[in-house]
Amino acid sequence: MILPYFVILPLLAAFLITLLAGKKDDWAITLAFMALISLLVLSIFGFVTMHEETVVYSMSGWDAPIGICLVQDALSLFMLVMINLIALTSLCFSIQYIRHLSQDWKYYALFMLLIAGMNGVVVTGDLFNLYVFMEIALISAFALVAYGCRAEEYEASFKYAVMGGLSSSIILIGIAFTYSATSSLTLARIAEVLPTVDPRLVLWIGALFLAGFGLKAASMPFHAWLPDAHSSAPAPISSMLSGVLIKALGVYVLFRLFFNVFGAPAIFMQLLLVLGALSIVLGVFLAIGQWDLKRLLAYHSISQIGYILLGMGLATPLGILGAVFHLLNHALFKSLLFYNAGAVEMVLGTRNLRKMGKLAKLLPVTSGTSMVASLSISGIPPFNGFFSKLIIIIAAIQAGHPIFAFWAVLGSLLTLASFMKVQRYGFYGEIEHKTPIMMPGNLVRFAMLTLAVLCVLSSLMVLPGIRELTLDPVVDVILNKTGYIRMVCGRAL
Amino acid sequence: MKDQQGMSIIVKTVTRVSVWLILLYGWYIILHGHLTPGGGFAGGVIIALAFLNVMLAYGKDFTVKWLNIQFLKDMEAASITLFLVMGLLGISFGGAFLANFLGKGKLFHLFSAGTIPLFNVIIGIKVAMSLFLVVWVLADIDSTKGGEL
């Protein structure tokens, strides 16, 4: 049984780092690497050997409705692979970048706590347990955003903490209402009892969760904290926040709650469609005018999350497929883009696009991988972003929402425009740079190259043979509410 | 007067006696966590408050000399690591993470309830150390220079 180790290993690494590290960071790096490599191997092993079954693990031997259970199904394993993959590349990138700031083990301890929180959110089958893990991940994220100790980082971190606290309070109120209505905190048990509850109360609970987790996912009316937090954090942390944190804490939980627990109620699906289309268009409009590279990328995160919400709101198998696929693709190319921005920042000491310039010669790997990532995010074939956006657009038309499909296409065109700007000013501009501050090391280049290769390879997942093994089981889990209840509660309905 | 820091001699004398009583009460709450209301968290807070009492009465410098801060930090990390190790022992002997693997003993006796008292002790130490260190960092921080944990 591998399930509890997804939480135990990163926690153990974090505590051993604080215990053993001393003053230097060598031990911390070794421990973090050991933990993350074993987590990635475990999650891939789990995904390959799952055979589309759900495994339930009862913590301390108490069974599901009484104790806390961990649930391993295709959706959670898919998220685990994604989280631990991005985390490992982020760690590769961190070493040089963080040593450049300070030689310190605290970063790695906080980083491992962040992973523990996200893995915990993804594996748990208990609503309050999910809340606790979410807080672990968030509190480490607040500290990591402020890691550079400059004034604007403190400001961003404070803003993030206030918005995070607000959304957590909304979620906590939602949990309290759920508990009073259903007398249970196990997700499967809630799903079982919820149809007998007063529909007005269900509406109210759903609205609270949509607002709370929508804030975590930074969909449009709840987005204000994201650009500050994601652009001020150290580059590897920006990539963790934009690449996986908003998905593990926001989108994943929305999937789990609104599909497996609430059973896709039509009114919330409509809301998700509208929120998704709003996020796509307004996010990209805000992004296109930015000159700070990381801020531009942060606004694009809002826009890309919009695509995922749009696919989710369609609630058709094809729409969910597109959303799940875009979830993975966005994690890959957005993390890569943040690494590129971080590498340029290391070399030139600036994030301003106007001050960059001819970088293609100076930084061949960075500019090459940034080209791959830019093409992926703008949806150019054969890169992965094209296929997932295409699936979402086709699904929208099939479901009879041509207007939403139009917004998605418009968003994609504007994304292309804004990344042409990034390439034009950032990597193929006029300014020559002769004296770089430092050059990116091998591990940094390795992290960028790995993700660039994956950006191309993951587009293979649309092929029917590979899709049946990877994406289809995830879609099945999301759409099969009764299956989730039956598997977790261990009895027929 | 030689020792300028802290409060008056009356407060110091009272604190010198009362701090041991508070510590004793904290340990009582922790050790009886499985029998009476309270437990690791509540008892840990009381222990932390005993240390804070000393810090208020005698001042920061004396407290840092009296308590070895590095030792407290190590205790904090070690206690939570021990918690995880106990949980892992639950996997090997009890069948699930954090499962009970000791004898349950007789109801309402001090040494009963399997691993729960042990977890209470570990959590008590962790909470006491964490809470005290948080306040110590806040007291130690120099707003012009920034602090260091």
Image (cartoon, coloured by chain):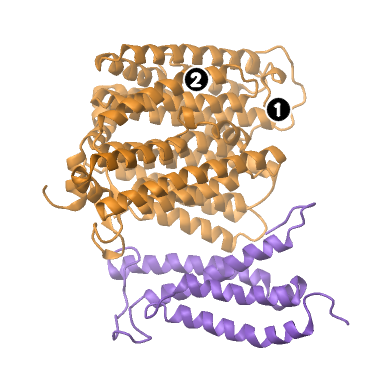
What kind of element bears circle 2?
A: helix
Q: What amino acid type is highlighted by mark number 2?
A: Leu
Relative vertical location of residue B22 with respect to residue A279 in this rendering, above or below: below
Q: What amino acid type is highlighted by mark number 1?
A: Thr
User: Viewer-proximal residue, A180 or A349?
Assistant: A180
Residue A336 % position (x, y):
52, 29
In terms of image quadrants, where is residue A394?
top left
Residue A38 % position (x, y):
42, 49
Q: Residues within 10 Å of mark 1 (few under 14, many from 20)?
A: some
User: Viewer-proximal residue, B74 or A406?
Assistant: A406
Residue at 35% across / 16% down in the picture?
A: A404
In the rendering, what colour is chain B?
purple
User: Viewer-proximal residue, B50 or B73?
Assistant: B50
How far apart marks 1 and 2 lie (CA) works out to 26 Å
Residue where numbered disc 1 is placed:
A350
Residue at 43% across / 67% down in the picture?
A: B85
Relative vertical location of residue B53 with respect to residue A227 in this rendering, above or below: below
In terms of image quadrants, where is residue B89?
bottom left
Relative vertical location of residue A101 with respect to residue B66 in this rendering, above or below: above
Label ID, residue A282: 2
Earlier-in-chain disc, 1 versus 2: 2
Judge whether residue A327 can be spotted in this image.
yes
